[in-house]
Amino acid sequence: MKFASVLTEKSMTQVNILEAFKNLTNAECLTIIETVLHMIREDLQKVEQARDQTEKERQLAEAAKALLPDYAPGGELTIFTVLDGEDFHA
């Protein structure tokens, strides 16, 4: 493809890209546009996943802080530790 060789130049600018497009067929242009859109979607998906992961971690940390008093000595959930030495059979 003609466009691929043009893209390998390091000094490629928007103007260069648009000029190169003028030399391509419509089919070649559409192929490139589809590829670029796919690349953009992948990048956006990665950003969204990172943002979702950060939000999930924030929510988990918030939940852990909220539950900390329940698990601290004397908290509601530690009261059951007095049963640790007892046999339990259902």
Image (spheres, grey):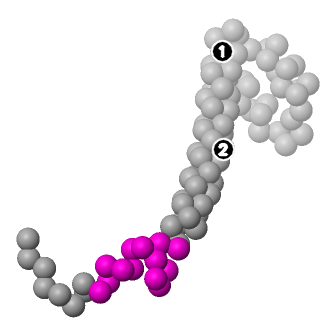
Tag 1: Cα neighbours inside 10 Å, few (<14), some, or many (≥20)?
Answer: few
Residue 85 is a magenta residue? no
Q: Magenta segment, which residues?
A: 69-82
Q: Residue sitting at 32 percent across and 84 percent down?
A: 81
Above or below residue 64? Residue 80 is below
Q: Amino acid at mark 2?
A: Val
Q: Residue sitting at 67 percent across and 33 percent down?
A: 40
**Looking at the image, can residue 28 be seen?**
no
Q: Secondary structure at mark 2?
A: helix
Which percent across, then down, holds residue 52? 59, 47
How far apart marks 2 and 1 lie (CA) works out to 26 Å
Q: Residue sitting at 60 percent across and 61 percent down?
A: 62
Proximity of marks 2 and 1: CB atoms separated by less than 8 Å? no
Q: Residue furthest bottom?
A: 85
Q: Which residue is mark 1?
A: 30
Between disc 2 and disc 1, the foreground one is: 2
Q: Amino acid at mark 1?
A: Leu
Q: Which residue is mark 2?
A: 47
| Residue 57 falls left or right of residue 6 | left
**Looking at the image, can residue 76 be seen?**
yes
Which quadrant is home to the N terminus?
Answer: top right
